[in-house]
Amino acid sequence: MNQPQADVARHLDAAQFEAGQVSAGRLEHVLRRGEFAVTAELDPPDSADPKDVFDRATLFGSAVDAINATDGSGANCHMSSVAMCALLIRAGYEPILQISCRDYNRIAIQGNVLGAAAMGVSNVLCLTGDGVQAGDHPEAKPVFDLDSVSLLGAIKRMRDERMFLSGRKITSPPRLFLGAAENPFAPPFEFRPLRLAKKVAAGAQFVQTQFCFDVPMLRAFMERIRDLGIDQSCYILVGTGPLSSVRTARWMRRHVPGVHIPDSVIARLEGARDQRAEGRQLCIEIIQEVREIPGVAGVHVMAYRQTQFVPEIVHESGVLKGRAGGMHCPAIGASSD
Amino acid sequence: MPSALYAFEPTGRRAGNRVGAARRSWSVRHARLLEFLYCRFERVLIASGLVLRWIGFDRLEAPVASIERAVKGALFDCRMCGQCILSSTGMSCPMNCPKGLRNGPCGGVRPDGRCEIDAEMPCVWVMAWEGSLRMRCGDRIRQPQIPIDHRLKERSSWLAVSRGEHALDGGESGS
């Protein structure tokens, strides 16, 4: 479709974007300051022991600005994202609360948002969520009362208009930095940038993408994003992660919804003497390449079962340029308990 | 009634939906024609609002809803969500998405354009994009849609249009 670009720009809330910081969080602060941000995903524990969360968070060291607390990722049951956020805040980290529309209706979601904000959560990532068939409870009822776009709109309304979807007043609104996900590597490719514009119009201020293993494809996507001016209205963090072996790569390609791994990556891993090291090297190279793409504001590292390698990957890529991530910024501090 | 079994609530994978997929494929391929016909029909609906009000919307609800279900079921594999947005989704009924997404595709669409959940079904939103490219007002696909109202399930969207509850050119407009 060749509508004028102004048409999309009209939907983008540029004025609000340029206004002051909406959250008390470190992530928004780092991004607004123009630093290259690093976020990472925490593997959620299958236990009721808080130590399991603390131990995993410690592995990130001072390499990340915020930690994503996943919400039943892959439709598998784990410790809840709200609880993980509360624990991470207790330990001094800055979490990103992931909310998946798969498991809750609008009443539960809005209640959780208020509760999370009350505990000091500053960032929310609004997701549709994988279908239940992908996980360990395929017989469960999929909820999907809202979708990711209407979820963004609902939380934006809670924050900015101080009301629930029902219109009922909220006395003290949640101060949240709103995020969304995008997959530049899944069809319909021409619609993806417009769909992202829709999310930004609905309230998204940052975006974390699906795993990027195909940099030329990401470049093409980002070109369209810049044409539409979306990078001026929201911060784009590109998803990356180390592949531990060619077997894992093949498995992910087949079983993880929306993951695109080109044959060249498979071939490179296959030819390597140490596949695990090669996977990490590939991840570092992708981070460095992605960093040079105009409009990319950061990276989001998803190192499933390889969390211990995240600091090494981030530091070797050089994206932090000597600055330390890790514990949240004392200058802001409001997200501590 | 059988259609209640296929309620628009996302129920995950639905078996035996090949006929429905063929219908949806046809309606997307003829999105331009269907858009033209619906624009005419919408004017008739709005113009006849007063007459329908005189007959009584409550009295009309059941018979009109059953006609609507039959017509739109045959054309679009309609799920009778009661708040039709076909004009904003390239004439591809979004309630056939197993996640019930009304604002665009999820991130799990397969490389061949098929559904994450049902590998044999083309993604509703891949089709919606194709349909919207054929339509005069296809850029409506860019408008954010509000959350669905579950109370309107099985009710007539046509009567809602004639009552003036759907805007003529708004994102709410349907079929």
Image (spheres, coloured by chain):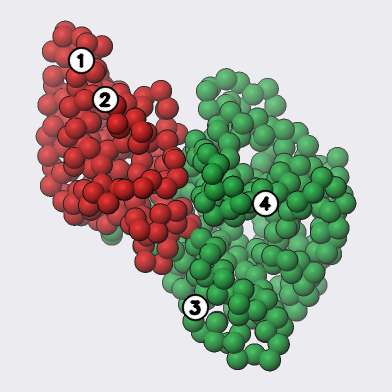
Chain colours: A green, B red
Against B154, residue B143 (above or below) is below
Question: Picture coordinates of residue B101 (x, y %)?
Answer: 42, 44
Q: Do labels 2 and 3 share a chain?
A: no
Q: Do labels 1 and 4 share a chain?
A: no
Give the crowd class for mark 4: few <14, some 14-19, many >=20 residues within 10 Å.
many
Residue A82 visible from this viewpoint: yes
For marks 3 and 4, the one nearer the N-term is: 4
Asked whether the beta carbons under mark 1 and mark 2 sit within 8 Å of each other, the answer is yes
Q: Split into 4 quadrants, where in the image is the N terminus of chain A? A: bottom left
Does dot 4 land on a helix, a strand or a loop? loop
Which residue in the structure is indicated by mark 2? B156
Res B144 visible: no
> Is disc 3 surrounded by few (<14), some (14 to 19) or many (20+) residues within 10 Å?
few
Identify which residue is drawn at 21% across, 36% down: B72
Quadrant in which residue B64 is drawn: top left
Residue bearing mark 3: A262
